[in-house]
Image: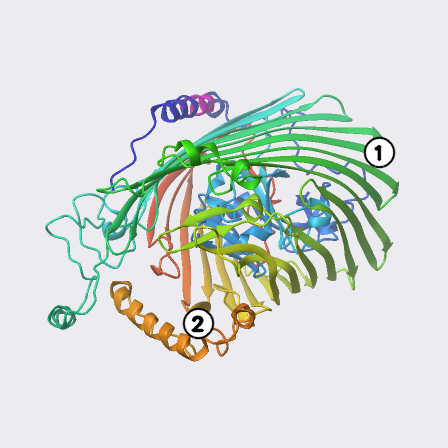
Amino acid sequence: MGKIRPSSIPRTLYLILFSGLCFLGVPLFSQGEVLPGKKTEEKKEEPEKPKVNPEIGKEIGNGNNERGSIITVTGTRRKGFLKDSTITTEVITRKDIDAMGARDISQTLGNVPGIEVRPAQAGERGATVRLQGLSGQNVLILVDGQRTTGRFSGSIDLTRFKAEDIERIEIVKGASSALYGSDAIAGVINIITKEQRDPYSANFRTFMGGGNPLYYGTGMELHNYASAGVRKGIVSTNFTAGWHRGDGYDLTPDATLGPKNGRIESLSPSYSPFPTNTPLWTKLYIYLNKLPYEGPLESTSGSAFEDLNVSNKTTFDISETFKLGFQFYYRYLNQSAVDAVPPRGVYDRNNKTHDFMGAVNADWEIAKTLNLNVNANYARFFDTFTYDQRKSDAQDKREKLDNAVTEVRTRLDHKIADGHVISYGAETLIDQFSSARIAPDCKRNFPNICASDILGTDPYQTQNGYAQRQRNAFYVQDEWRISKAPRTQIVPGIRSDHDSIYGGQLLPKLAVRYDVTDKFRIRAANGLGYRAPSFQDLYYNFINPGVGYRVAGNPTLKPELSRSYNIGGEWEPNKVFWFSFNFFYNNIDNLIGFRTNPTRDASGLQIYNTSNYQKALTKGFESSVTIRAHQSVSFGGGYTYTDARDELTNLPLEGRGYHRWNANIRIDHLPSGFSFSLFAVIFGKQAYYCQKNPLWCDPQLPTELSALSAQLTTQATNMMNALFGNIPGGIQEYCKERNLSYCTTGPTYGVRMVNPHTNLNIRVSLKILGTFEMFAGVDNLLNTFDLIYNPQKPRFYYVGIDGRFSVNPGPADYSASPTPSTSPLPGIP
């Protein structure tokens, strides 16, 4: 696969923005520090206190290195100090993001106990998240409280969210649908972007990286971004622009070097059909015995990409009681890859994506006891997918996906007394969706025939279906500090959602905090979460006549429902040691899966319909510890136990491991400006399904022996048909759904526990002249990956420079972190 040809418009736009933002830094650098006594009034060293509840933040933080002075908004949708929170909230600060060397949020979240980031599976994009054992389709991802669009197979691609304009990331685990509505079954991840705090500031970062040419080729991955901001009078604004590009990577077992990028060139004279390091005797045996062997085809594991990001956040402090904010972001992404489909199919795949979000927010303190917040936002995600079969046009296709979401939210906070605030909220959301993977209206309505069925259409351009829904919601939440000593707080809430497709849903929640002492506190929460059926679930339309089946949606689906329970505690005996733990339990009903229809369609194809027949259970334990051994040296660690199980089949949920460990070491030597960080995530074995025949699984053979695997499967199928073929179809379907291999000819599954591995990243940096920072690092130092189970990036080296210019340089750049050497993230000092 060759390199992407860059689009001239995005590149030209980026060069103009990047040059302008860097240019703004020149006068700032020349001004240097503001002299004593000349500091502007706009500079705020302390976090802004919530307007409605002046009691918040009065106590002095005594935990995890003053971590409590950080402001969070996700748990209750109101600003409050972390140390005062009733709902457990974990925060990754800007300093944490830099120490991890993260280029996007997928490289940050995996360092939090209870959160797992995995390479995308079939139908997904980039990298996805699991929270407490639940998949990405059950996690709600927000940007400054705004919903994001563009899900693939229900999951959001985490690599979409670049690190350049992120101030902090807030995580709330457990069902949060009572506050946020659909999709928040497992929890909420809220990405908070940077706000301008200094009178003038600018910064830039540029770095490059690569790895073994066997996997990465000879090209380099480049990342550049710049930002500039002004805070003057009532206005504060910050612009950010970033440009990223790379040639992708290839993990295919055959590693024969071709003429471009070190990828497989199956048509080149030097191509070897055998995997790397295959013994000579094995090659001879296969050749002489004429075993059914198919050599690997040209393919890639990670897409080549070009990525443009532009964003702005502007705030007008019109008066002491009224604030108006505007923000937007735009992202253009061009990805290319090569897919192999045995025995001889090779396809060039390309995605061009445009991603936009704009929002306006007004906050008005009507009176000392009343505060009104109004927010309106619009998000649009447009993707063009092109699939080009080499040496043939038979399988060529182009599909377009267009998803637009418009949302208006209002919230009224009423202060009843000190430590007691009731919030009333109302929301409306319009979701418009157009995709080739859902049936068009003419197929969903009588007589179920489209004009294209009669007149014919371009087979290259797949016809889109269109769907729309509207959700209206109202919620009430009561934040009440019942007692100061011992400190006791409760947050009950209830939300009523009404969807134009499936009707209404009532969602209660309750969170409790009890401080046993000033050093030990307990938090507990439970709630009902739900996920509304997606448009694909409702109107899915996919036909595979070559294999003989059709997948169809089901417009009568019910929402998936979750009952979530979390109870945990924090112990902070001093500023050196901090420990936290949490037990979780999630039970999900009405899970949507595919079910065999007993009748075939008019053309004789087997039909699979979406259905609410599955159930799942996840339970486990999370723990974190932080030890500050010295003013400049700290250690952190964590352990997560997760038992995720399909209650219908009694199989563990695929891809989940029971055990996972986190560890980190941080050194920040302020006098010299030297920093070192090490982050490790250790995965235990994970469960992956294997088809039984019918009592045990077939041996796991390499992909080049796929023809031999097919022979074994055929023999097993013939045996099962002979043994169980006379059992009535209804009984067979019952046994198939429950994975009972002794009474069905359908496929049943066992489990292989495989793929234990360790991800280890290191980073070093050195500050120069108080303004610049040189840094270098290695991701995946141990070079762990697996083509089937863990197709992540191989070992990756990078080096770069960072520049920060401000009239008030200092720790305020890490606005979410109280001091340059502290971190609020559990397990990350």
Is residue 23 inside the magenta stretch? yes
Residue 448 x, y percent position in the rendering: 53, 40
**Helix, strand or loop at mark 1:** strand
Check the image and name the residue furthest to the right: 417
Image quadrant where one finds the C terminus = bottom right
**Image vertical order of residue 170 relative to residue 737, above or below:** above
Q: Which residues are magenta?
A: 19-26
**Helix, strand or loop at mark 2:** strand
Crowd rating for badge 1 (residues with CA inside 10 Å; few <14, some 14–19, many 20+): some
Residue 420 x, y percent position in the rendering: 85, 46
Q: Nearer the viewer, residue 133 or 320?
A: 133
Image quadrant where one finds the N terminus = top left
In which image quadrant can residue 547 be found? bottom left
**Image vertical order of residue 188 relative to residue 353, above or below:** below
Residue 216 in view (yes/no): yes
Task: Please name the predominant secondary structure of the magenta segment in the image.
Answer: helix
Q: Earlier in the sequence, mark 2 or mark 1?
A: 1
Residue 222 in view (yes/no): no
How many labels, in total? Answer: 2
**Label 2 vs label 1: CA separation?**
56 Å
Amino acid type at image mark 1: Leu
In which image quadrant can residue 79 be found? top right
Is residue 655 inside the magenta stretch? no
Residue 366 x, y percent position in the rendering: 83, 28
* Left or right: 125 in relation to 591: left
Q: Which mark is residue 370?
A: 1
Residue 327 x, y percent position in the rendering: 59, 28
Amino acid type at image mark 2: Met
From the image, tell me which residue sits under label 2: 753
Crowd rating for badge 2 (residues with CA inside 10 Å; few <14, some 14–19, many 20+): some
**Image vertical order of residue 374 relative to residue 676, above or below:** above
Q: Nearer the viewer, residue 295 or 814?
A: 295
